[in-house]
Amino acid sequence: MPRRPFTRLPVEERRRQLLELGAELFARHSYDEISMARVAREAKISKPLLYHYFPRKQDFFVATLAQAAEQVRVLTEPPPDVPPAEALAASLDAFLAWVEEHALAYRKLLESAGSVPEVRVLVDGVRERTAQRILDGLGVAYPPPPRLRAAAHAWLWFLDGALHDWLAHRDLTRTELRDFLLGALAGALQVAGEEALLRV
Amino acid sequence: MPRRPFTRLPVEERRRQLLELGAELFARHSYDEISMARVAREAKISKPLLYHYFPRKQDFFVATLAQAAEQVRVLTEPPPDVPPAEALAASLDAFLAWVEEHALAYRKLLESAGSVPEVRVLVDGVRERTAQRILDGLGVAYPPPPRLRAAAHAWLWFLDGALHDWLAHRDLTRTELRDFLLGALAGALQVAGEEALLRV
């Protein structure tokens, strides 16, 4: 059985460390403020080595976001074998806790999602998969009826709108926000004609 | 009484014509594809004259959007003296008709809203004013309670999410979409604890 080349783990470890540094830097500064020279300096590596991992700044930025998206996906994996409403509440709880912990970064993302085309593609992809996950969780057969697909999709925009408002005002508790969001989802699903799907 | 300088109207007329041309061009092409040279050529004016009206391409783009936003604001002014639910339905009808007529442009806007920082500011401002208009229409005193403010604000994101989905799939009629959107708004307001505000 072939062994993995011995450099494999350090390379992955380095990449992981760079992405963690990126998450920190992009949370505190705008995209334009961060240069690859600065990233290399803060990471204590040479610029050529940094460019070996990420050929362009936008690749580094997108990889940082993709790692955060993957982290969120794992964090919000609902517990198995619980009723749909409970699973959704648990996922949303985990997501809101993550947003609160990364408030600055999430706010930046909401405000600059279009600045790099790849970011929009990534955000669209995350919404697409999350909408599908919500519908799967509710036991909706694929492909979903148009209104239900629209409801799940539009609610994810509602979620970001509510977070945009919440991060600016912070005048609801996280639990109040969660209940408000779950109620709005139930309302959207109900008006989509599937009121039996979710009772909150 | 002083008369307006005689060039006043032609200048405004020229500006209006340029913005109409801009609306057409930006609907059919991405921001990066349009050069000021091309705008001047299609407008049959010199580049210096174009730059006299709009010092930078992004000024031209933002002015184009601001004019469209103003057009939408006027179009969606609800008829006076009708009940809140009816006024909202009429405004939403007018807005959806406008979106359908400018489908390509609106899709582009949703997809590239962040590419120019001024555009994000403009979109945020439109959402802010529209949320306030919705709450005013419902007779909510200023400042609105946090949940109601969040509901109106987040619903405008929901609206854009639903339009993003609708413009991609087009498998709901405009009336179905309108009723779905009004129902979702009623649901969000209801869960915000103000169920008496809107019955659809």
Image: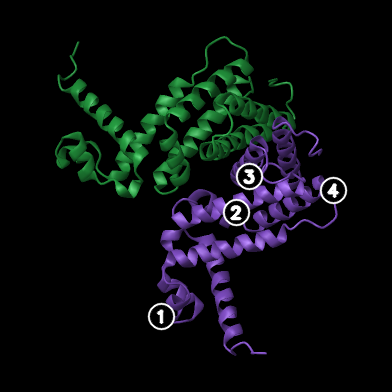
Chain colours: A green, B purple
Q: Alpha carbon of mark 3 to alpha carbon of mark 4: how far?
A: 21 Å
Q: Alpha carbon of mark 4 to alpha carbon of mark 1: how far?
A: 51 Å
Camera-side mark, 2 or 1: 2
Where's the C terminus of chain B, which quadrant? Answer: top right
Sequence-first disc among 2 and 3 = 2
Sequence-first disc among 1 and 3 = 1
Q: Alpha carbon of mark 2 to alpha carbon of mark 3: how far?
A: 10 Å
Q: What is the x, y in percent for residue A11?
A: 20, 26
The label shown at residue B126 is 2
Please give the chain letter of the residue carrying mark 2: B
Crowd class of label 3 (few under 14; some 14 to 19; many from 20; radius 10 Å): many
B8 up-or-down from A163: above or below: below
Q: Give the amino acid type for the residue marked by disc 4 in the picture.
A: Pro
Sequence-first disc among 2 and 4 = 4
Q: Is residue A52 visible?
A: no
For label 2, the SS is: helix
Please give the chain letter of the residue carrying mark 4: B
Question: Residue tagged by mark 3?
Answer: B156
Please give the chain letter of the residue carrying mark 1: B
For label 1, the SS is: helix
Q: Name the residue at 74% across, 58% down.
A: B77
Q: Name the residue at 52% across, 17% down.
A: A78
Q: Alpha carbon of mark 2 to alpha carbon of mark 4: how far?
A: 23 Å
The label shown at residue B83 is 4
Question: Residue tagged by mark 1?
Answer: B48
Q: Which residue occupies the foreground of this view, A192 or A93?
A: A93
Q: Do the CB atoms of the residues marked 2 and 3 lie less than 8 Å apart?
A: no
